[in-house]
Amino acid sequence: MVSADLPAGLSDWQQAPRVRALNDRPSVGAGRYVLCWLQQALRAYDNPVIDAAVRLGNVLRLPVLVYHGVREDYPYASDRLHHFILGASVDLADGCRRRGLAFVRHVDREGQREKGLVYRLAAEAAVVILEDQPTFVARWQSERVATRVDVPVFTVNAACLVPPALIGINVRGRTAFLRCHEPERAHWSTWDEEVADVKPYAGALPFTPDRSENADLVALIANLDIDHSLPASSMHPAGRVAAEARLARLVAEVLPGYASARNDATRPDGASGLSPYLHFGVLGPREIMAALQGARAGGQHKRKFADELLGWREWFHFQAHALAAPERYDRIASWASETLAAHTGDARTEQETLAALIHGETRDETWNACQRQFLIDGWMHNNLRMYWGKRLIAMTPSPEAAWATACYLSDRLSIDGRDPSTYGNIAAMFGGSPSDRERPIYGRVATRGDGSTRRREGGTEWLAAASLRSVPRVSIPSEVPVDPYLTGEATI
Ligand SMILES: Cc1cc2nc3c(=O)[nH]c(=O)nc-3n(C[C@H](O)[C@H](O)[C@H](O)COP(=O)(O)OP(=O)(O)OC[C@H]3O[C@@H](n4cnc5c(N)ncnc54)[C@H](O)[C@@H]3O)c2cc1C
């Protein structure tokens, strides 16, 4: 839908290209509020989803009700993900109240089940505003809800600085993408936060909202039917305060050396560590770029960071929006799937069990060092991820199994998993430029060594120590699970 078809409040909005209609319900209903349903854009300020809801609320003279719900049965639900999500949710609630908006949360659990809560909340709404996420649960849930409710549903992009819809649909490569993306950045770097004209919604609700604050979360999460074997990450504390501290560290300590230190996995301060906060929208790209403006760092560092945050991250978001199922193996380059298929009969002497892979207890010391970052920290350094991913092609029975295993390990263990960057980068590890050499198992897909870490001063010692870090013993499934949203078996 083009912006001209959007209702007043969204169409005249300077950010209309962020907005898409998800269904064709003709007109705004006679509801009591504008429902703003957040799944992953978990910040109260500089959040285009909330701003869109407030704008529409102001036009309709209706209050906004912000809703965030967490269930026990989303794939890979664990202490790690629940802590990160709910910690962000508590701060989101505070921020919404400060903005004069009503916020309600539901954590689904034994004794407090709320079947079809989103539908019941939508039934009382005039219109539903939700976020445009191109991967995993958020995408499938939004699409499903939009087909089943009687009111209009609009989806708003909050993940990117430049709305992906502005990039031409015929754009195929990253160079062409950057040609469209770069000229747009300045325009989308400024914004006016929308202020609610209408008092917070204080009317009836179809459920009793959850009031848990940070202090209650540990006990709450301990009683849920989720994977308790995977603990929260101490490297990435949940919530807005932790995210702001990480951003301040980037500006003061990381950015001044970023272009040269970023590829050094042995340095704890070489990269920003922001990806978990970006994935769950605790921070948005616009405020990160704004914070960088005043940083005392050379232009080469700022440019390099912008290339990662905007040039790469938003390229993968754009790709994911263009694909029906970005999480599927069939997205990889056809030459790559052909050359890999031609080698499926090759001997695979380096295969490992799923238990050895998950715990980082394989015969490959470097791989174990990488995997233990995922398992312990819930994050992996960028420079290790390509080695980690490419080696899986030899460590699993087939290229399809390597794909599924890479997605599973990222999605379950890494806080920034389940993201457009997850599947885009995993696809890139199967593609890139074809190698001149034809190798066993890999065919013409390029391999990757560990020299960029091992050859550094102290690199060999660092890898040895990192491969021996003590890991939590986590549950091991009998086989790599298939994402139920890909098989159509998911319910909401
Ligand atoms: C095989 C493989 C799998 C990956 N899986 C994920 C994933 O699940 N989730 C994820 O967010 N990133 C993923 N990446 C990209 C990248 O490794 C991480 O974004 C980065 O390591 C996060 O650390 P950081 O925040 O310190 O990055 P920094 O170096 O500080 O970069 C700043 C930000 O730029 C973005 N960025 C940096 N590198 C990339 C990249 N290659 N692609 C897209 N965005 C990038 C991230 O949002 C990051 O937070 C993957 C890369 C590879 C090679």
Image: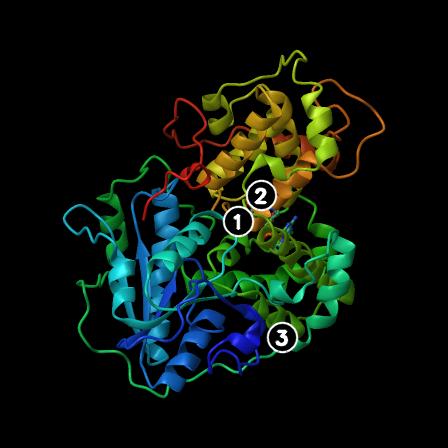
The extreme right residue here reads 436
Give the quadrant of residue 332.
top right
Residue name at image x 41 percent, y 71 percent: 44
Give the quadrant of residue 430.
top right
Residue 467 x, y percent position in the rendering: 56, 29
The span from disc 1 to disc 2 (Cα, nearest Å) is 7 Å
Residue where numbered disc 2 is placed: 423
Residue name at image x 74 percent, y 65 percent: 180
Residue 216 x, y percent position in the rendering: 24, 56
Residue 294 appears in the figure: no
The mark nearer the N terminus, 3 or 2, is 3
Q: Is residue 219 above or below residue 479?
A: below
Tag 3 secondary structure: helix
> Mark 3 against mark 2, which lies toward the viewer?
2
Amino acid under disc 2: Tyr
Residue 381 x, y percent position in the rendering: 60, 44
Is the shortest distance between ligand 1 and the CB of mark 2 under 8 Å? yes
Residue name at image x 64 percent, y 27 percent: 391
Amino acid under disc 1: Asp
Mark 3 Cα within 10 Å, few/some/many (few <14, many 20+)? some
The span from disc 3 to disc 2 (Cα, nearest Å) is 27 Å
The extreme bottom residue here reads 197
The answer to whether mark 3 and mark 2 are in CB contact below 8 A is no
Is the shortest distance between ligand 1 and the CB of mark 1 under 8 Å? yes
Residue name at image x 44 percent, y 32 percent: 482
Between residue 348 and residue 237, name the one nearer to us: 348
Residue where numbered disc 1 is placed: 419
Between residue 431 and residue 228, name the one nearer to us: 431
Which of the numbered marks, if any, corresponds to residue 189? 3
The mark nearer the N terminus, 1 or 3, is 3
